[in-house]
Image (cartoon, rainbow, N blue to C red):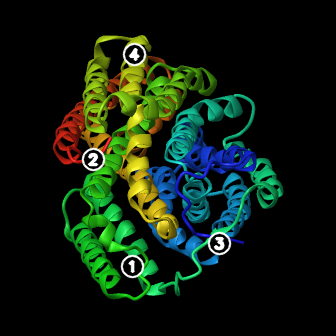
């Protein structure tokens, strides 16, 4: 078994490069599962009939559980072996995918997605920490991290396309079953092609710290969702307050433990902290927007799942190429310049999406989507390389867990916050509408979600059904435009932060 001994400048072997291809398998899959459900939302809404809150939890809970588990799992990999944890996670991911596929209620699907998120959280940090140990040469490591981020980004971006292809032929549960054969392939190839690494001096795993990290993440997210769904109240305030308090206690505990879950000294490095913050903002705006794009293409423009997936698939190419280009861009420009310009470019793309109400074709949406994707694409690779370079090799697992937590937390937070804002605006607009021909219960369903309105319009039919559909679509487009504007403001703010905080980062 290899230990964490750093050999600066040592070139990677052929086995290491083949191992990188093996690592790409789970990386693509667990990120793809953040978005693969986007195109299945209408079918799930029709089959399981979840309320708006349950529907958001079906989409969000996977990312929340991944985010909550990453720090713990990254540290656990340092202790029991990163390859071993990766393979354990692969087995659990395959099993929970089967459970999700055959869910018979919204509650069962939420539970299955939560377990699937925990399994993904055990795989995720192992992939990046293995790269840190397999590639010692700075240039090779930067390239390998670029490949890793490209796989992560492409997986999330092609999720809707893969989902569209599957949904064109099978029921919604089939989007989960594709995970099973790939996880079996990873279990077969991993032991032969991936080296094992662990920190022989890592110490024991602190269970209380692990519980604190999970509770802090879930409590804060729960409170934010409740505010967006029901407005300010005692319950969400208590939840957010409890989450923040537990988070503070978590970091204080890490500062005094002999074997902390995370090394809080890492956050004293300006580059490390700035990179994490930038990751959160970049993924926040991207993942939230892709959820709306999938619904817009299907429920507003009337596309089928496959056609909608084809329209969104070029974004995966843009992210993959941008991630791979990151090492070359920073050779010629300071990382601060690349990241700042990237956010400003993405803001232009988001601003274009604020004009969707002026067109009935997908071309404006497609152009805006490609612009913000090209702007954000190199950012993740650059910030990840900063994080992994500044962290000591023996803490690679913990550092990768922190880094990926920023990715997953940003994605889950984006879908939760922006999704909840869009839902709240949609409800506010629809609340003032008089829906002729519908009983009270059906009218409530139509005013709750666009998917519910589409289903009710089909049942109603005729002129009343057409009027309901037009009203609901207009409300959704308005909500989409507002959230796109908020994303543009977020990108501009992130550009200013990057310009200030990344000045001292070495090229």
Quadrant location of the N terminus in the rendered image: bottom right
User: Which of the 4 image quadrants contains residue 147?
Assistant: top right
Task: For marks 4 and 2, give the one nearer the viewer.
Answer: 2
What is the CA distance from the residue labelled 2 to the residue labelled 1? 32 Å
Q: Which residue is the site of mark 4?
A: 367
Q: Nearer the viewer, residue 167 or 206?
A: 206
Vertical arrangement, residue 267 with respect to residue 483, above or below: below
Q: Are marks 3 and 4 in contact (CB under 8 Å)?
A: no
Q: Residue at x 53, y 20 (%)?
A: 311
Q: Are marks 2 and 1 in contact (CB under 8 Å)?
A: no
Task: For marks 2 and 1, give the one nearer the viewer.
Answer: 2
Quadrant location of the C terminus in the rendered image: top left
**Residue 66 percent across, percent down from the top left:** 50, 60
Residue 108 disc label: none
What is the CA distance from the residue labelled 3 to the residue labelled 4? 44 Å
Q: Which residue is the site of mark 2?
A: 505
Instruction: First in sequence, mark 3 or 2: give its number.
Output: 3
SS for dot 3? loop
Q: Residue at x 42, y 11 (%)?
A: 361
Q: Which residue is the site of mark 3?
A: 81
SS for dot 1? helix
Q: Nearer the viewer, residue 189 or 286?
A: 189
Instruction: First in sequence, mark 2 or 1: give its number.
Output: 1
**Residue 219 percent across, percent down from the top left:** 34, 69
Left/right of residue 487 with respect to residue 377 in the rendered view: left
What is the CA distance from the residue labelled 1 to the residue labelled 4? 43 Å
Q: Are marks 3 and 1 in contact (CB under 8 Å)?
A: no
């Amino acid at each position: 078994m290899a230990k964490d001994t750093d050999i600066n400048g040592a070139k990677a072997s052929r086995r290491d490069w083949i191992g990188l291809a093996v690592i790409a398998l789970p990386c693509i899959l667990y990120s793809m599962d953040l978005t693969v459900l986007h195109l299945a939302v209408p079918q799930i809404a029709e089959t399981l009939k979840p309320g708006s809150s349950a529907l958001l939890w079906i989409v969000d809970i996977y990312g929340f559980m991944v985010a909550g588990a990453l720090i713990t799992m990254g540290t656990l990999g340092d202790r029991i072996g990163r390859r071993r944890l990766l393979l354990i996670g692969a087995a659990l991911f395959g099993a929970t995918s089967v459970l999700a596929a055959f869910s018979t209620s919204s509650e069962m699907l939420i539970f299955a997605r939560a377990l699937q998120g925990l399994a993904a959280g055990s795989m995720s940090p192992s992939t990046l920490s293995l790269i840190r140990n397999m590639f010692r040469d700075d240039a090779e490591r930067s390239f390998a991290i670029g490949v890793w981020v490209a796989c992560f980004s492409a997986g999330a971006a092609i999720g809707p396309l893969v989902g569209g292809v599957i949904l064109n032929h099978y029921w919604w549960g089939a989007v989960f079953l594709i995970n099973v054969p790939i996880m079996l392939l990873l279990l077969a190839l991993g032991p032969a092609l991936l080296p094992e690494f662990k920190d022989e001096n890592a110490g024991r795993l602190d269970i209380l710290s692990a519980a604190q990290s999970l509770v802090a993440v879930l409590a804060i997210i729960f409170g934010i969702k409740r505010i967006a769904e029901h407005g300010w109240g005692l319950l969400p305030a208590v939840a957010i307050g409890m989450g923040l308090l537990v988070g503070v206690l978590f970091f204080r505990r890490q500062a005094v433990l002999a074997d902390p879950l995370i090394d809080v000294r890492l956050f004293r490095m300006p580059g490390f902290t700035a990179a994490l913050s930038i990751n959160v903002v970049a993924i926040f705006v991207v993942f939230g927007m892709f959820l709306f794009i999938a619904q817009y293409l299907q429920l507003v423009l009337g596309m089928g799942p496959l056609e909608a997936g084809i329209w969104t698939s070029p974004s995966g190419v843009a992210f993959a190429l941008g991630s791979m280009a990151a090492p070359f861009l920073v050779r010629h420009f300071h990382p601060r310049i690349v990241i700042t310009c990237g956010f400003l470019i993405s803001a232009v793309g988001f601003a274009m999406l604020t004009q969707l109400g002026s067109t009935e074709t997908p071309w404006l949406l497609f152009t805006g989507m490609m612009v913000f994707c090209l702007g954000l694409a190199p950012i993740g690779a650059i910030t990840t390389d900063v994080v992994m370079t500044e962290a000591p090799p023996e803490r690679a697992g913990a550092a990768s867990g922190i880094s990926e937590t920023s990715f997953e937390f940003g994605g889950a937070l984006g879908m939760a916050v922006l999704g909840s804002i869009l839902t709240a605006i949609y409800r506010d607009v629809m609340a003032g509408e008089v829906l002729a021909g519908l009983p009270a219960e059906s009218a409530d369903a139509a005013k709750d979600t666009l998917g519910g309105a589409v289903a009710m319009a089909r049942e109603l039919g005729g002129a009343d059904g057409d009027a309901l559909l037009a009203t609901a679509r207009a409300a959704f487009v308005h909500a989409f435009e507002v959230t796109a504007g908020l994303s543009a403001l977020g990108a501009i703010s992130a550009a200013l932060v990057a310009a200030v905080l990344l000045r001292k980062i070495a090229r």
